[in-house]
Image (cartoon, rainbow, N blue to C red):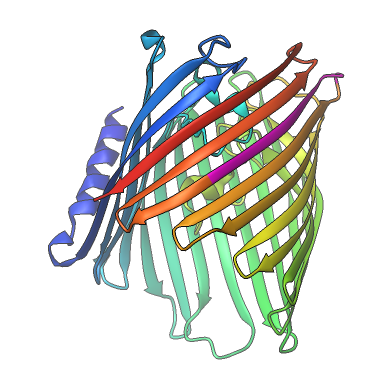
Amino acid sequence: MKSFRLLLGCYLLSLAFGVQSAAVNFVPQVEFEVDYVDNIDLAKSGGRDDLVAQINPEFLLEVASSRIEVQADYRLQNLVYTSYSDLNETYQQFHGNAAVDIIPSKLKLNSIASYDQQIISFDRPTGTDNLTGADNTTNRGILGLSPVWTTNVTDRLIAEVSAGYYRVTDETDSDSYNYGITIYPFANKSPLDWRITGNLRDVDYDNHQARDSSRGAVSFAYPLTNSLSAVSEIGYESDEFDNGLFTRSDSGSIFIAGLTWLRKGEVTINLNYENHYYGNFGSGSVYFKRSRMAYKLSYTEDVTTDLDQDIGNLTGGGDSIPSPVEGDSTGIFLQKTFQASATYFYERGSIDLGARLDKRRNGTNLFIPGRLINPDEDFLELNANWSHQLTLRHVLTMGILKRDRDVSRGSHDKDYIFNTALDYQINPMLSGKFFYTSNQRNSNFRNSEYDSSIVGASINVLF
């Protein structure tokens, strides 16, 4: 807790550093919303109907100068139930990051702070489960500080050395220590771009477990022709996990290769192959546009977690360690994803059709910190969306989503979701929305079958 408070002080200090000569953009706003919730089986009200009022203030802060760059946004959501005041809830979200040049071109201080609770969005549901604050409330905080030192190793080489500390509060709180070095050419005039990277990550969990990850690699990027370019990476990585009773280690080589082909901005083709000690993965995507139509096909193989969050998300990218798992994940999956979409554009709007298939298989050869192994799962989503500009101030949207989830143990969830909304712009400072959404669910896992709907209206005031 002392280190957490110290880090918070350093973060606030970085926000204040150099602000006097900086350009500041502060945008406060407040949203007022009323929602009628009908027969939400999983809602806190136990399926009863209710009228819910929302008062949601938020702000955006941007600060920029020659030596400082800050971005921060905050949202406070207040839910007031008309008939059941004991269900009233408050949710918060805060995301902030700052970069300060302590010594210009030499020493930079990067900081990150975030806090997330479940935010209920009645008008943008992926289903009505997001009304279940009692079951799905998430409290996750990240606070981190990372100084980066840049120096000339020789007249032609530059080195960046970083050291970071991150406090994560989640299901299992942890302290993460990240160390990294990157070496790359100075004022490179050759078409070949290369860099050498090394990273070490040490995570200490509050439940006395620990994880150490390291990675070293050399990467290259080279344009083969005006439209074709290649990338490759060769290296070594290791991962060690200690659960307090035993220690398990895994390590192996890294090989990554990829090709990208561009043609007049109308066609893009990407092909990638990755070889790691925990598996081999391939991915590819094709995007092409003809007249008013745009098409995209993609296939990926990867290691994911229940949180779909990797180390790069935790540290904001940059010198983070590309690791197969995120520190506080609840499950590890080998995931294959196929996506296809077609979009038709016309003068006042667009029509989009899409499909996504996810096949998740347990990564039993990977570390799962104190977790039970989850069953295999298949996810299928089919969607159709329409957006039409009625007038300069009014936009109408409609969407249909079919979602299936099948689990190897025999259970399944099926959702049929319809939503429509009318957005209107009264003036540059005032906007609003009317919306309706419905969900038909069938689940033998929860042994439930029900229909639900939400009708709402909101107004947003920008100051």
- The x and y percentages for residue 340 are 79, 55
Left or right of 59 in this view: 177 = right
Q: Is residue 333 above or below residue 412?
A: below
From the viewer's side, name the closer residue of 447 and 177: 447
- The x and y percentages for residue 153 are 43, 76
Q: Is residue 184 above or below residue 223?
A: above
- The x and y percentages for residue 362 are 79, 32
Please give the count of numbered marks on the rendered protein: 0
Left or right of 373 in this view: 99 = left
Specify the segment rendered in magenta: 409-421
Residue 270 appears in the figure: yes
Question: Residue 366 appears in which quarter of the rendering?
Answer: top right
From the viewer's side, name the closer residue of 248 and 78: 78
Question: Residue 444 appears in which quarter of the rendering?
Answer: top right
Location of the N terminus (image quadrant): top left
Q: Residue at x 41, y 41 (%)?
A: 166
Q: Residue at x 72, y 72 (%)?
A: 292
Q: What residue occupies the far front of the structure in this picture?
A: 391
Left or right of 431 in this view: 136 = right
Q: Residue at x 25, y 37 (%)?
A: 6
Q: Residue at x 30, y 57 (%)?
A: 70
Q: Is residue 203 above or below residue 130?
A: below
Q: Is residue 37 above or below residue 87?
A: below
Q: Is residue 418 magenta?
A: yes
Residue 272 appears in the figure: no
Magenta part mainly helix, strand or loop? strand
- The x and y percentages for residue 391 are 49, 61
